[in-house]
Image: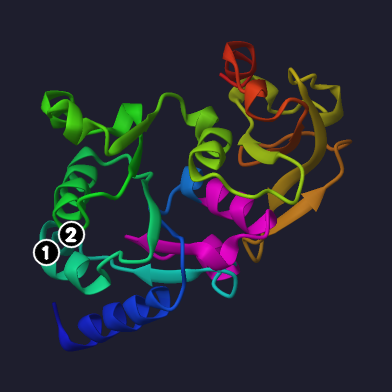
Amino acid sequence: MGFFKDRKVKKFAEKVAERENTIFIFGSDIVTENFVKDLVNLGVGGRVALIAEEDSLWIDEVEEQITILVEKRKEEYDKPQLFNTISFSTAEKIIILHKDPGLVQSIVGQIKHVSHGLKIILIAQNAPPFIKYLSEAQRERFIIVDNIYQVTTKLYKEMKLNLVKPPIITVPVCERMFGMVAKDLEAPNSVLLRVVRKHEDTGKDELMSPKIRLKPSDRLMLYLLNDEATIDNEFIKFFE
């Protein structure tokens, strides 16, 4: 790891070491974006430490609300130095949202040597195959979230967040919804609040009226009527 890269990692490590119950999140894609922004909207952004493998406009948007480390060199995730420097001593949970199986396996392999009792949360479809061959005691370290649409509410429950705001999530629109008026949708067990749309010039999120017609990159901001119980098979199929 180069001098300036090493300095950047140390600065990140110093920041997170000053906090308690840190939520470490690995990722940078749309799933990560939605989850991080939901945490910020819930008022717990100060506990979030994001480790991303690439820069993104949405990361710039939340840089004042969360702690961020961008490490673009994927080979660094195969080495212990990055993880030893961060140490994860203040971590409450580690959440890995990457889709790249090689990257996920590298992160899991390094983290389990750094903090032996720390819970690691993964999406089932991205979980490394070797997990199923671990001993029962070793598998208890992993929390496997079955479906991508269950990420927000299940992770809230696992992290035991003291929510002071209502359960609100954002969900990407699916192809059959393109061109439809948002307010005409009837998502199960939820209320549509706004459409989240990226500004064409700045790339920043804007909250739009439900009266607009939906575009491919839009997300629906939904109020869940029954908290995590809302995310059932009916809800999931609605967005497939």
236 with respect to 74 (left or right): right
User: In which quadrant of the rendered image does the N terminus lie?
Assistant: bottom left
Q: Position of residue 139 (x, y in %)?
A: 22, 31
Which color mode does the image show? rainbow
Give percent across and percent down for residue 145: 41, 30
Q: Give coordinates of residue 126: x percent, y percent.
A: 30, 33
Residue 116 vs residue 28: left or right? Answer: left
Crowding around mark 2 (Cα neighbors within 10 Å: few <14, some 14 to 19, many 20+) is some
Q: Residue at x 64, y 22 (%)?
A: 229
Name the quadrant of the C terminus: top right
Q: Tell me if residue 25 can be seen.
A: no
Residue receiving disc 1: 80
Q: Answer whether labels 2 and 1 touch (C-beta < 8 Å).
A: yes
1 shown above or below 30: below
Depth order, front residue of 212/94: 94
Residue bearing the label numbered 2? 114
Q: Which residues are magenta?
A: 33-61
Query: Residue 185 or 45: which is nearer the viewer?
Result: 45
- Vertical side of 178 occupied by 221: above or below: below
Residue kind at label 2, given as amino acid type:
Val
Locate residue 181 relative to residue 44 in the image: left or right. right
User: Which residue: 54% across, 29% down?
Assistant: 149
Residue 141: image tag = none
Where residue 210 appears, as percent x and y from the top left, is: 85, 37
